[in-house]
Image (cartoon, rainbow, N blue to C red):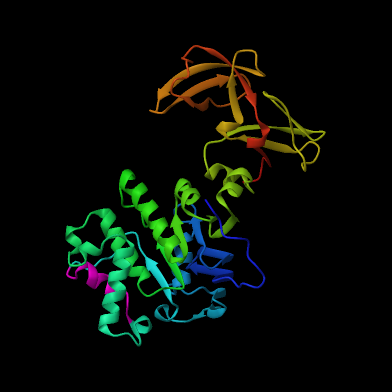
Amino acid sequence: MTHPAEPSADVPPRLDLRGIGLRFGAVRALADVSLQVRPGEILALLGDSGCGKSTLLRAIAGLEQPETGTIRLDGTLVSEDGRGVAPEARGVGLMFQDYALFPHLTVAENVRFGLHGKSLQGRSAAEARAIAQARLEQVGLADRARSYPGTLSGGESQRVALARALAPGPRVLLLDEPFSNLDRRTRDQVRDDTLAVLRASGATTLLVTHDPEEALGFADRIALMRRGRIVQVGTGPELYRHPATRFAARFFGDLVEIGGTCRAGILATPFGPVPAPGHAEGAAVTLCLRPEAIRLGAPGASLRAVVRARRFLGAAALLTVSAEGVPEPLRLPVPADDPREPGDTVGLSLDPAHGFIFASEAD
């Protein structure tokens, strides 16, 4: 994927959040959230349910008012310490996961409904129809303009909702779990189609998702959230290869975790010594390994292991192996034609480039 260039001091962010805080009663929903999004960038807000990502989206849209912090759109202040510009005056498009299409309106009328208030000022009815038709052509549904939502598939409904959100030409487009109601095959195709539309339109977009695979494949950058805070921001490869915390490492896939004590900058493991730079002498540390860090080989490699189970996955297979000193069984993907079967002895070696060491008490 091609990512936008790094921010330039000469180009202000399209969206600028500083110190956003919000509580619902005794529950802290957002805590000191700061984030900048570049013009034309697609950024994913990623995290578990209840981490605050949808609340942050609603705060940007003006549907929730933060108690502290500031929100700026193209340098214009739209929210500050409990006061904010009305949602309809922000130039922000919002698309929910249920799409919220009006069943009594045609597809074209649903899209034109997105052109209201300030977005319609100075436009004639004919211009509004032309804009709606252009957006429907952009999402590949020009031939369904006179259809009603009840006749559409889930993927078609999603594209109509996207066309409606894009119709006013919003400064920022906010997508809240837009693909979660689709089956997997439809979801993959609609997601690809949506990404193509967003790239073509140049829309600055924030996508809320709990799916790390979706965030990695869809967004230019990812903001990983936990308990109302942003844990780490970066490109997909940056978060996957260089997680800032053990929580971030765990979020992007299975980990093999091996604890121990740092001695002279080294952690002794069943695979052999692993450098542990930056950790104090005697510190309790944990080595976190992604499956690709562990390589299968012939018996006699650095660590002996036994295949316990094999599962066919189509183009690949998954081997479950056990090794002395490793606390949990290892699940290692292999090509479908790999000959190893349960009961076979194998050798395991380690590629430390795919491993991370964290302080054991850190999370």
Q: Is residue 242 magenta?
A: no
Place of residue 236 in the rendered image (x, y in percent of width and height, measured from the top left): 55, 49
Q: Is residue 8 left or right of residue 44?
A: right
Q: Residue at point 67% right, 40% down?
A: 360
Q: Can residue 99 be spotted in the picture?
A: no
Place of residue 272 in the rendered image (x, y in percent of width and height, measured from the top left): 71, 24
> In the figure, 45 relative to 84: above or below?
above
Looking at the image, the residue that sits furthest to the bottom is 122
Q: Residue at point 55% right, 80% down?
A: 77
> In the figure, 227 relative to 277: above or below?
below
**Foreground residue among 174 and 83:** 174
> In the figure, 234 relative to 123: above or below?
above
> In the rendered picture of this protein, how many numbered marks are placed on residues?
0
Q: Residue at point 28% right, 65% down?
A: 100
Q: Is residue 301 left or right of residue 279?
A: left
Q: Residue at point 38% right, 84% down?
A: 118
Residue 3: image quadrant is bottom right
Q: Can residue 116 be spotted in the picture?
A: yes
> In the figure, 215 relative to 330: above or below?
below
Place of residue 210 in the rendered image (x, y in percent of width and height, measured from the top left): 45, 51
The magenta span reads 104-116
Residue 297: image quadrant is top right
